Amino acid sequence: MAQQSSFDVTTGVDLQEVDNAVNQAQKEIAQRYDFKGSIATIEFSRAEGTLDLTAESEFRMDSLFDVLQSKLIKRGVPVKNLDIGDIKPAGGDKVTRQVKLKMALDGDTAKKVAAAIKEAKLKKVQAAIQGDQVRVTSPSRDELQAAMALLRGKEFGVELKFGNYR
């Protein structure tokens, strides 16, 4: 029997890079003239994988989010993996927004990835959902490379990572 080659399709963000981006954004907000004397905070909860933003108005919230997003992009954090919540009024004049980090493939996205591979009808390439990842196997490494190229070309709503290639 031929040797089976495989790779795993996952997603996620580097929490340390998110932490660094939050710290840089807080420093910039502290020094920006348009935020002087106003309430604008970013709280990062590593355990829950959430970012809680608080500002005085929707305009300031948009500016705060733009600063955070630019820092995340500079640090190489995929912005596709942010689940951006709605702006909600908080007590007083404040508004809040919660941004969740997508750390793993959810069931729907994993099904879409597996279906995309099956629809492409690549020769002897099989996709199996294993928890929060998709394992793609084939006897041909060239077919696996073709499967990676196919997945990179499609949009799944998250940044796909390919690992464990053997």
Image: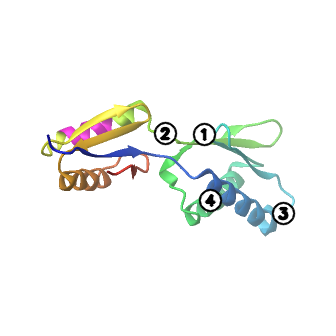
Q: Which residue is at the front of the view, 143 or 118?
A: 143
Between the residue at mark 4 and the residue at mark 3, the CA separation in whole angstroms equals 17 Å
Q: Nearer the viewer, mark 4 or mark 2?
A: 2
**Does residue 87 show up magenta in the picture?**
no
- In the image, the segment drawn in magenta is 111-118
| Secondary-structure class at tag 4 | helix
Up-down: is 74 above or below 83? below
Q: Which residue is mark 4?
A: 66
Q: Which residue is mark 3?
A: 36
Quarter placement of the N terminus: top left
Between the residue at mark 2 and the residue at mark 3, the CA separation in whole angstroms equals 38 Å
| Secondary-structure class at tag 1 | loop
Q: State left or right for residue 127 relative to residue 33.
A: left
| Prevailing secondary structure of the magenta residues | helix
Residue 63 rendering spot, x and y as whole percentages: 67, 58
Residue 104 - label:
2
